[in-house]
């Protein structure tokens, strides 16, 4: 006989009564795991959607404004390409993507469009909605500094974290949907720009923005054709919104005092509001487990102590001290918390995997780290909720407990 | 030696005060066999619990081997109960979800005895009380007499010097009651002190000494006829 034997025997003798307490923890943990898992994948899906809105920070020439940017009328104002190098070499955190651009008007078959030079990978990372073009992959998460693979950009190599292979060849072009429709041109067909031959490698899906009427070519080819070597019209940045909150814009301003740094407030606000909503929901689920699980466990332990009053008295008569009585009830609470936590984590993960994709809009996988945390939370709530009734049982007057009087 | 000096116990029942024990002075030397008798509600069980360190008196002192029991901390009082006393209850107070063997092992576990030794000592006790066949039975699977024998075996597990029995035969048939009383007598012969609270005049006569309580006061204290 040992403490655990006494606890096990009692648990298995009164299984039906225990079920309420076990279910309280199980449901609480399941709710936390399911909601947190779905929220995690929702956050990722929402982040992708928000990224699809494009850059949230723009670096423009000092005298330009947003209207110029959106109308792609930036041909007059420029700043040095060296700004990109300064950003890459800086220790600024939260720059998910940096996309330098140079733009100029171009007339194709009598209609005016915009010719834009880009560093290929960068541009595509910034536009998730272009993923279906199947040309480039897209990074996820904050602080992933983009890389470029171009002989003229070798000076950036030391600043980048890893090399990227995919590049837009200097004879390749990408067409916005509106341009492709007007020119009746498809991927693989030739295109002549400024008396130079290009090959259309992809037609981009419609975005409903100025990008639909752009023709994209390699930045350095565009600079050469526009006779604007070493200068840019804009740098688009996808900044991590928490970093923006933490003053990223001010830091860029300090780094590039001769440029205008603009935040696209609507995008950033949406990101911040979404993150706030997600965080709020997370807290709500925590409150649910503490209230639901805690109340269930506390109620069960109070009833269990009352039912076992005479048993407690008998144990005290046999010489059980307060610590032994306290240990009996707390060990039981720990076992309930552990069992409820493990089963709740499994149930929560299953629920999240079954119903999550419909809610989150993406595949949902179990999160072992979260399951461990939720189980620990279940145990902690179970112990905390049981402590007071267990303490009272341990402090009970032995003769009162015996009810022999 | 158990000594009670000017022990008074008062209960509060709502606004009313009930005097359970009043100015009790009593000495029980080692090896004595004392019956405590009196009408219902006269304070017999209160006296027994106060002697066993289970009930703090409102006033007065209870000494066990010269040590004031209620000056000890709750944990130390529990230790004295564990080492010194063996309680027997009218309703046996067996733990319902444990088998006979496990019930007997509980005081040994509380004492910190190894599981191997618990098993050995339990088997000896089960054999002594003719319960070997019932060792794996739970209380509800045993007769009332068998349950009381398990309770006696459990009480003996820690080899107590003093046995405090609260109406141990009240729920038993005459034959079983006689067996239990004979057993208590044997334990007294072994040198253990026995304090028996009883309503039964026959049971009381088996003791060496009878203490009579009346309305919480000590009405008489004398030797039985056989002594």
Image (tube, rainbow, N blue to C red):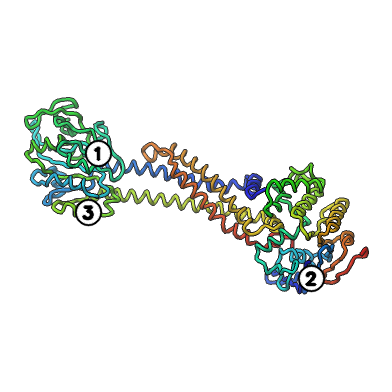
* Residue position marked by numbered label 1 in the rendering: A125
- Image quadrant for the C terminus of chain A? bottom right
**What residue occupies the far top of the structure in this picture?**
A189
- Marks 1 and 2 close (CB-CB < 8 Å): no
State which mark lies toward you, 3 or 1: 3
Q: Position of residue A99 (x, y in %)?
A: 20, 42
* Residue position marked by numbered label 3 in the rendering: A251
Name the disc covering residue B6, or none: none
Q: Position of residue B67 (x, y in %)?
A: 72, 68
Name the disc covering residue B216, or none: 2
Q: Position of residue A113 (x, y in %)?
A: 12, 36
Image quarter of residue A152: top left
Image quarter of residue A121: top left
Residue drawn where x is 79% and y is 51% of the image: B148
Q: Nearer the viewer, residue A121 or A292?
A: A121
| Helix, strand or loop under label 3 | helix
Inter-mark Cα distance, 2 to 3:
87 Å
Res. A113 visible in picture:
no
Residue drawn where x is 65% and y is 59% of the image: A321
Inter-mark Cα distance, 1 to 2:
91 Å
User: Please, which chain is the residue tagged with disc 2 on?
Assistant: B
User: Please, which chain is the residue tagged with disc 1 on?
Assistant: A
Q: Position of residue A147 (x, y in %)?
A: 23, 39
Q: Nearer the viewer, residue A341 or A315?
A: A315
Picture mark count: 3
Image position of A93 (left or right of A232): right
- First-in-chain label (3 vs 1): 1
Discs 2 and 3 share one subunit: no
| Helix, strand or loop under label 1 | helix
């Amino acid at each position: 006989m040992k403490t655990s034997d006494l606890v096990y025997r009692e648990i298995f003798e009164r299984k039906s009564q225990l079920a309420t307490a076990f279910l309280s923890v199980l449901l609480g943990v399941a709710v936390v795991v399911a909601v947190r898992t779905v929220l995690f994948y929702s956050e990722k899906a929402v982040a992708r959607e928000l990224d699809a809105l494009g850059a949230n920070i723009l670096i423009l020439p000092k005298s330009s404004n947003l209207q110029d940017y959106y109308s792609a009328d930036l041909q007059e104002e420029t700043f040095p390409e060296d700004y990109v190098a300064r950003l890459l070499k800086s220790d600024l955190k939260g720059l998910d993507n940096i996309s330098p651009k140079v733009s100029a008007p171009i007339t194709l078959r009598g209609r005016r469009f915009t010719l834009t030079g880009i560093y290929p990978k960068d541009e595509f990372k910034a536009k998730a909605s272009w993923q279906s073009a199947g040309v480039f992959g897209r990074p996820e998460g904050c602080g992933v500094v983009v890389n470029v693979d171009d002989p003229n950009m070798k000076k950036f190599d030391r600043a980048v974290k890893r090399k990227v292979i995919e590049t837009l060849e200097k004879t390749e072009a990408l067409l916005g949907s509106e341009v492709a429709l007007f020119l009746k041109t498809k991927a693989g067909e030739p295109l002549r720009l400024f008396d130079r031959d290009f090959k259309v490698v992809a037609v981009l899906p419609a975005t409903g923005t100025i990008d639909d009427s752009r023709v994209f070519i390699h930045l350095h080819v565009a600079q050469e054709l526009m006779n604007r070597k070493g200068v840019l019209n804009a740098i688009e940045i996808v900044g991590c919104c928490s970093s923006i909150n933490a003053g990223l814009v001010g830091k860029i301003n300090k780094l590039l005092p001769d440029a205008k740094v603009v935040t696209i407030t609507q995008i950033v606000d949406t990101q911040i509001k979404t993150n706030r909503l997600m965080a709020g929901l997370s807290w709500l689920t925590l409150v649910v487990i503490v209230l639901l699980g805690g109340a269930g466990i506390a109620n069960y332990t109070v009833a269990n102590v009352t039912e076992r009053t005479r048993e407690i008295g008998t144990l005290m008569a046999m010489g059980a001290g307060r610590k032994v009585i306290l240990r009996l009830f707390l060990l039981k609470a720990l076992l309930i918390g552990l069992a409820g936590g493990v089963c709740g984590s499994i149930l929560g993960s299953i629920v999240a995997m079954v119903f999550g994709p419909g809610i989150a809009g993406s595949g949902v996988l179990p999160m072992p780290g979260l399951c461990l945390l939720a189980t620990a939370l279940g145990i902690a709530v179970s112990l905390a909720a049981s402590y007071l009734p267990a303490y009272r049982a341990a402090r009970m007057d032995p003769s009162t407990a015996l009810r022999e009087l | 030696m158990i000594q009670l000096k000017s022990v008074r116990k008062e209960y509060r029942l709502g606004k009313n005060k009930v005097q359970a024990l009043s100015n009790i002075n009593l000495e029980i030397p080692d090896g004595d066999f004392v019956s405590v008798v009196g009408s219902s509600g006269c304070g017999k069980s209160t006296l027994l619990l106060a002697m066993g360190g289970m009930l703090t008196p409102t006033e007065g002192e209870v000494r066990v081997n010269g040590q004031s029991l209620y000056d000890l901390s709750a944990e130390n009082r529990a230790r004295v109960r564990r080492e010194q006393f063996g309680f027997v209850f009218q309703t046996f107070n067996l733990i319902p979800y444990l088998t006979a063997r496990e019930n007997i092992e509980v005081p040994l576990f509380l004492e910190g005895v190894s599981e191997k030794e618990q098993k050995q000592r339990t088997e000896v006790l089960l054999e002594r009380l003719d319960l070997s066949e019932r060792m794996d039975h739970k209380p509800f699977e045993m007769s009332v007499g068998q349950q009381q024998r398990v309770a006696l075996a459990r009480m003996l597990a820690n080899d107590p010097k003093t046995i405090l029995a609260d109406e141990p035969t009240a729920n038993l048939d005459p034959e079983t009651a006689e067996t239990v009383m004979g057993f208590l007598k044997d334990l007294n012969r072994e040198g253990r002190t026995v304090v028996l609270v009883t309503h039964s005049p026959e049971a009381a006569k088996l003791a060496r000494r009878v203490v009579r309580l009346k309305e919480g006061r000590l009405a008489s204290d004398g030797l039985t006829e056989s002594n």
